[in-house]
Structures are given as structure tokens and as C-alpha cells.
Amino acid sequence: MNARTHIVVCDRNLPLDKVPVEVCSGGVFDFRKPRALGSLQIDDAFVGFEKVNGEHQVILHRVDGRKTTIWGDSYYTAWQICTILVSALSDLESVYTRYQSPSA
């Protein structure tokens, strides 16, 4: 993700400031070079994306080599990036499976 700026929020998730990703929280939000998130939990907004062919792009890389590219035109000025706890994902999968099963 080639964002140059992280949006800092208060405890109510209201925006307070824009901070360069390389200095915000010691660079923990600097994702301009692909890296593993590990146990990092984020629910944060980013701005200041470099354009690629006139569009903003976010590329999410998986450890297994697969990737997803998300793009937006000039109307998209910020991206909100969220991680999810594995335990929460398991709960979501069980709910999804339950609703996909045919009713008896």
C-alpha cells in the first residue's frame, strides 16, 4: 500500500491529525514495502496515495503469493484498512456456513 500519510484518531475514532507513515508510531503504519502484518491489529485510514495509471491502488499480498488489487479513481482519497482476529473469522465462517446450508 503506497500511502504516505496515516490518519490519527481519538478514542472515539474521530480524525485528529495526518501524520507521515514513516514517523507515526515508529513507522508501524508504513506499508509502502510489502511486509507481514503478524499480530498487528489495525482499523486505520490512510491518505496520500501515489497514483498508478491515474488511479489509486492498494495491493494486498498474502504469504502464499496470492494478491488482491483494489483501485479507485480520483473520488477515492482515503482507504480504511482493517484486520480481523482469527477467532472472529472463525465465528464469521460458522455463521456463513449456517446461512448457506439448506433448511430442513
Image (cartoon, helix red, strand yellow):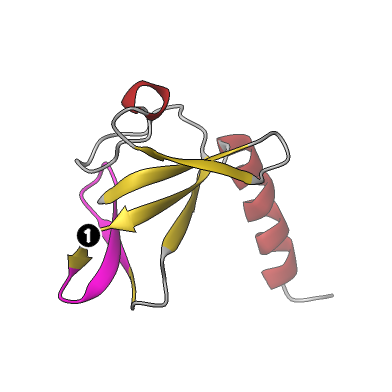
Residue found farthest to the top: 26
Report the residue at 37% width, 33% height from top: 37
Q: Position of residue 62 (x, y in %)?
A: 29, 47
On-image quarter of the C terminus? bottom right
In the depicted view, which residue is nearer to us: 93 or 58?
58
Q: Position of residue 81 (x, y in %)?
A: 47, 50
Magenta span dominant secondary structure: strand
Report the residue at 35% width, 21% height from top: 26
Residue found farthest to the right: 104
Report the residue at 24% width, 55% height from top: 66
Depicted 80 relative to depicted 5: above or below? below
Q: Does residue 29 appear to the left or right of 9 in the view shown? A: left
Q: Position of residue 46 (x, y in %)?
A: 42, 50
Q: Identify the image quadrant of residue 30.
A: top left
Depicted 65 relative to depicted 58: above or below? above
Residue 9 among magenta residues: no
Report the residue at 73% width, 68% height from top: 99
Query: Dot 1 surroundings within 10 Å: few (below 14), some, or many (20 or more)?
Result: some
Depicted 90 relative to depicted 11: above or below? below
Residue found farthest to the front: 17
The amino acid at mark 1 is: Glu
Depicted 58 relative to depicted 104: above or below? above
Magenta stretch?
52-70
Report helix, strand or loop for mark 1: loop
Residue 58 among magenta residues: yes
In the depicted view, which residue is nearer to us: 43 or 63?
43
In the depicted view, which residue is nearer to us: 76 or 70?
76
In the depicted view, which residue is nearer to us: 26 or 19?
19
Q: Position of residue 54 (x, y in %)?
A: 20, 76
Residue identified by numbered label 1: 50
